[in-house]
Image (tube, grey):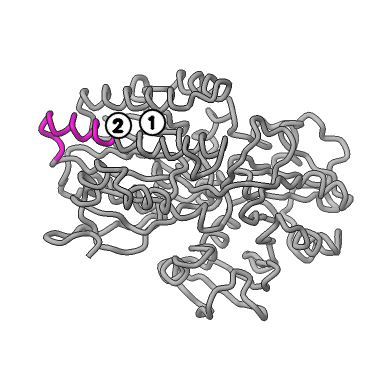
């Protein structure tokens, strides 16, 4: 067991906080507590979230050290082809919007352990994935859904933010070793307006005051110097001006879709459409012998020869990834085509003509770190690794769609209307803040790296088979040097 260097870790997740918007507010001097108590004391790392970049699945990296594909929770909605074909299992399909959010932890592979299972005196606040946080350690086990519905009906998400802060401060007085706290306001006000609307920016400034209050409490208790504090986000957002109905598109293609919320209409369906964050979708297709098998590109093109081309003709569709016969994905866009496959730690990438992401030339063989570093500052940071990894999940779609910024993939049954969306591979959704009071070696990071770093700081052993890598601590220099 490693030697503990901290008594307490606090992970404050500002749902929907964009790295660039937070950076702009820092530069304007609007976030003095985050600047003075976190950035100046520790620093900020350039970071990407997981794909799909959406609430819920993108919490998993922080809580398990594993990506959504590893957990087999590939989106906010998913469809299990094998179980759907086999009968009436409760686990045939899922939407974590609403009451089914309580199923997220049970839907993960059972061998994956959460931070709450690994740290007995840990606490969860407004987080739906709290397996292992028994009794009072899940401080909002029942009340979470009440707060969400109340705020959804009234648009008073500031009320829920305040409740989260109040519960966090109260729990910290009980001296736990670890607290994970979700603040939903930035995400929700961005959805209602847009990511730079004054209502959303006000939540960033409120977030700064919340950080100040927590730091003050810990300082008065003599714990601040022994606390590892991480301010993070699960995704960004982009403003949405046009909604594209994937269900209507599939109907026009002769492939009528099963979709939420009309899940009791099953007769005659030849496809399933599961949208996440409205900026990405998993599509599943019925084969000639039923639903059970994944559908690869060759079979899909025999069934519907014009489907992929027709998708790419839609302005709302930016990237299409379709399963291929090699266990990877063919990636297509209006810019070009490539194929990608994950083989253990090796990532194999072959461009066919022009690169579909517009990347500069890349090696045909990379590891996951090289993939992140070489694509970080592009419009599609880490997209190769994220697609190749997600396609390995049994519940992932036969086709995955990533939306063009400004568009989303859900027109009907979205109340209230979303004026900002997330979920896609675009940098506006994938780049997130990772700010801490700890001095860490400056390098590009994934959100999944926070989990092993926190465990190490608390002197806890790391579970095997996680996706995250330790963020290295340094001394005597600034993180941003």
Based on the picture, tell me whether residue 212 belongs to the magenta stretch: yes
> Dot 2 corresponds to which residue?
122
Image x and y of residue 93, in percent: 67, 37
Q: Marks 1 and 2, Cα distance to the nearest angstrom?
A: 9 Å
Number of callouts in the render?
2
Q: Name which quarter of the figure residue 116 lies in.
A: top left
Q: Answer whether labels 1 and 2 touch (C-beta < 8 Å).
A: yes
By secondary structure, the bulk of the magenta-drawn segment is best described as: helix
The quarter holding residue 261 reads: top right
Q: Residue at x 86, y 35 (%)?
A: 267
SS assignment at label 1:
loop
Within 10 Å of disc 2 (Cα), the crowding (few <14, some 14-19, many 20+) is: many
SS state under label 2: strand
Image: 401 above or below 240: below
Q: Residue 246: horizontal and vertical position, in percent?
A: 76, 47
The magenta span reads 211-224
The spot of residue 215 in percent (x, y) is: 21, 35
Q: Is residue 467 one of those drawn in magenta?
A: no
Residue at horizontal 53 percent and vertical 64 percent from the top: 379
Q: Is residue 293 left or right of residue 253?
A: left
Q: Quadrant of the image for the C terminus? A: bottom left
Give the side of residue 284 with respect to residue 114, left or right: right
Q: Would you name the residue on which mark 1 appears?
A: 132
**Can residue 81 be seen from the camera position used here?**
no
Nearer the observer, 286 or 337: 337
Query: Would you say 349 lies left or right of 476 here?
Result: right
């Amino acid at each position: 067991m490693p030697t503990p260097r901290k008594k307490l870790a606090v992970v404050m997740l500002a749902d929907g906080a964009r790295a660039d918007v937070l950076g702009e507010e820092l530069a304007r001097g609007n976030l003095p507590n985050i600047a003075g108590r976190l950035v100046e004391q520790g620093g900020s790392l350039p970071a990407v979230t997981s794909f799909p970049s959406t609430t819920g699945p993108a919490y998993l990296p922080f809580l398990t050290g594993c990506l959504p594909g590893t957990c087999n929770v590939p989106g906010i909605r998913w469809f299990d082809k094998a179980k759907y074909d086999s009968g009436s299992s409760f686990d045939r399909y899922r939407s974590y919007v609403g009451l089914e959010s309580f199923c997220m932890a049970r839907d993960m592979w059972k061998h994956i352990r959460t931070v709450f299972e690994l740290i007995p005196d840990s606490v969860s606040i407004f987080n739906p994935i709290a397996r292992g946080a028994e009794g009072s350690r899940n401080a909002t086990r029942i009340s979470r859904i009440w707060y969400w519905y109340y705020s959804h009906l009234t648009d008073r998400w500031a009320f829920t933010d305040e409740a989260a802060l109040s519960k966090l401060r109260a729990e910290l007085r009980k001296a736990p070793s670890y607290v994970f706290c979700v603040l939903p306001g930035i995400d929700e006000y961005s959805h209602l307006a847009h990511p730079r609307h004054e209502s959303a920016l006000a939540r960033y400034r409120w977030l700064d005051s919340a950080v100040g209050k927590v730091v003050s409490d810990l300082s008065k208790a003599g714990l601040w110097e022994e606390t590892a504090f991480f301010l993070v986000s699960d995704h960004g957002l982009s403003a949405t001006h046009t909604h594209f109905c994937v269900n209507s598109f599939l109907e026009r293609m002769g492939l009528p879709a099963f979709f939420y919320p009309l899940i009791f209409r099953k007769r005659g369906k030849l496809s399933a459409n599961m949208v996440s964050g409205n900026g990405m979708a998993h599509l599943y297709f019925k084969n000639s012998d039923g639903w059970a098998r994944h559908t690869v590109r060759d079979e899909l093109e025999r069934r519907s020869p014009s489907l992929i081309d027709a998708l790419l003709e839609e302005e709302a569709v930016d990237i299409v990834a379709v399963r291929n016969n090699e266990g990877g994905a063919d990636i297509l866009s209006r810019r070009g085509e490539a194929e990608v496959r994950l083989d253990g730690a090796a990532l194999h990438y072959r461009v066919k003509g022009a690169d579909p992401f517009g990347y500069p030339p890349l090696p045909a063989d990379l590891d996951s770190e090289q993939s992140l570093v070489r694509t970080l500052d592009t419009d599609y940071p880490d997209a190769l690794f994220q697609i190749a990894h997600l396609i390995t999940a049994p519940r992932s779609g036969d086709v995955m769609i990533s939306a063009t910024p400004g568009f989303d993939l859900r027109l009907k049954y979205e109340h209230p209307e979303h004026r900002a969306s997330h979920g896609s591979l675009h940098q506006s959704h994938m780049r997130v803040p990772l700010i801490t009071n700890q001095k860490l070696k400056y390098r590009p990071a994934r959100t999944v790296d926070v989990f092993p770093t926190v465990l190490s700081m608390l002197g806890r052993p790391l579970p095997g088979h996680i996706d995250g890598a330790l963020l290295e601590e340094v001394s005597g220099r600034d993180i941003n040097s």
